[in-house]
Image (cartoon, helix red, strand yellow):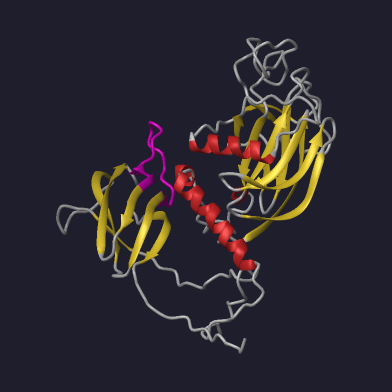
Amino acid sequence: MCKKVYVYGNVWCDDQLDLYIGNEKKVTNYILSQNYPSTAAFEEIAVSCCDYFYFVCWSNDVGRNGFLAELHGANTVLSGSKHWQVYATGADKDFNNDRPSQAEINQFIRKATCEHAWQHPTVGQKNQNLNVPFPETPGIDQNANFIWYDSGNDSRNRYPSPPYVPFVGITTNVNGPTHDEFLIFRIPVHLLHPESCQDCNCCEGSACCSKCSETIEAQESTISERAQKKSLVINAEGNNNRRCHGPYSEETCSQLDIPKIEPCFYLNFGDSNSDQLEEHDTEVAYLTICNPYRNMMFKGLTITEVILSPSSPLTPNGELALQIVPDKLVHFSCLKACSCLSREFAIMARGIPKGTYTVEFKYCVEEVLVLDEHAGSAVFEIDIVRS
């Protein structure tokens, strides 16, 4: 289970907005509503690293359309960054008394996720007094960009040319909502707390969309509710662990201190013991990674970056005098128990000054799996009294 983090922010939409928190499949908690021209602010709230912010926005199909957001955690995220996603539902809403229901929103979120239909929004001007087509909106960071979805229903000039489609509505629109509104914008919480959330294993993609998982989740919820309605709770005799605070307790989840478990790394090159990397040379090297553990497996092992130091000077034609290729995103996939895997790298020297250089392979591992089984028992004393 992912830890709780804290986020606050300011939002604005022309014309209406409802803000929710949810997971990748659905919204679960309503936060606030906003109506043009006001800016809405929410105070610091506790959310999970695996949560998403969902911003449900729609316009009245005339005038201007746009959405602004300023979110704060350990990091600040503004509307217009590359991580924002939008889904156009095509379900027309026009006024503040015609707000989509939570069930309706969840229907479209599931559809967007399972059909991989989330898109990047159109990014417009910054929140500065530029009038293309918006003036500055008070209460939102000036570096936030207005964003919206472009349906292609409007044939006029697009931003940054006037009239700045899709940030303007169509006065007469016989084919439905101007830009297939209402729109659902979203951003993941973990971007606001990257360090606190780096070890979270959140459900992603189509794995969240199977009918089986949806049914199991609903049944688990029903059984959990039944259990929590019971009045008596008996602790198992082994529940002297300080981590056992009671079923469904907010204090149930705590961090287990696990020693850092790392694979072994080796770099092999040279056709003989006397082979050296020379000032003008090309060598094929092999990075070998081994798992020395019988009961562990490294899943999703990736070399994220290769760093040479000191930094290489440039040759007369502008190339690096010392290069290693590839220098990013080399995948090893799963490293099974007591096994090794190797990948090829080319080391190219083009007039590099002689000396000692360091090659650093930065890596990440998605999961460290324990391949072990153990058995135990939970003992309860149940008193039977005379009826």
Which residue is depicted at the point 50% across and 56% down?
201
Q: Is residue 39 left or right of residue 314?
A: right
Left or right: 168, with 240 as reference point = right
Give the answer, above or below, for where 204 lies relative to 316.
below
The answer to whether residue 308 is magenta is yes
Is residue 66 located in the magenta-colored stretch of the structure? no
Using the image as rendered, state which of residue 244 and residue 138 is in the foreground. Answer: 244
Residue 353 to residue 162: above or below: below
Seen from the viewer's position, the closer of residues 385 and 7 is 385
Q: Residue furthest front?
A: 387
Q: Is residue 211 visible?
A: yes
| Quadrant position of the C terminus in the picture | bottom right
Residue 335 coordinates in the image, percent (x, y): 31, 58
Front-lying residue, 92 or 317? 92
Most extreme residue toward the bottom is 386
As drawn, 65 above or below 30? above
Which residues lie in the magenta part?
Answer: 305-330
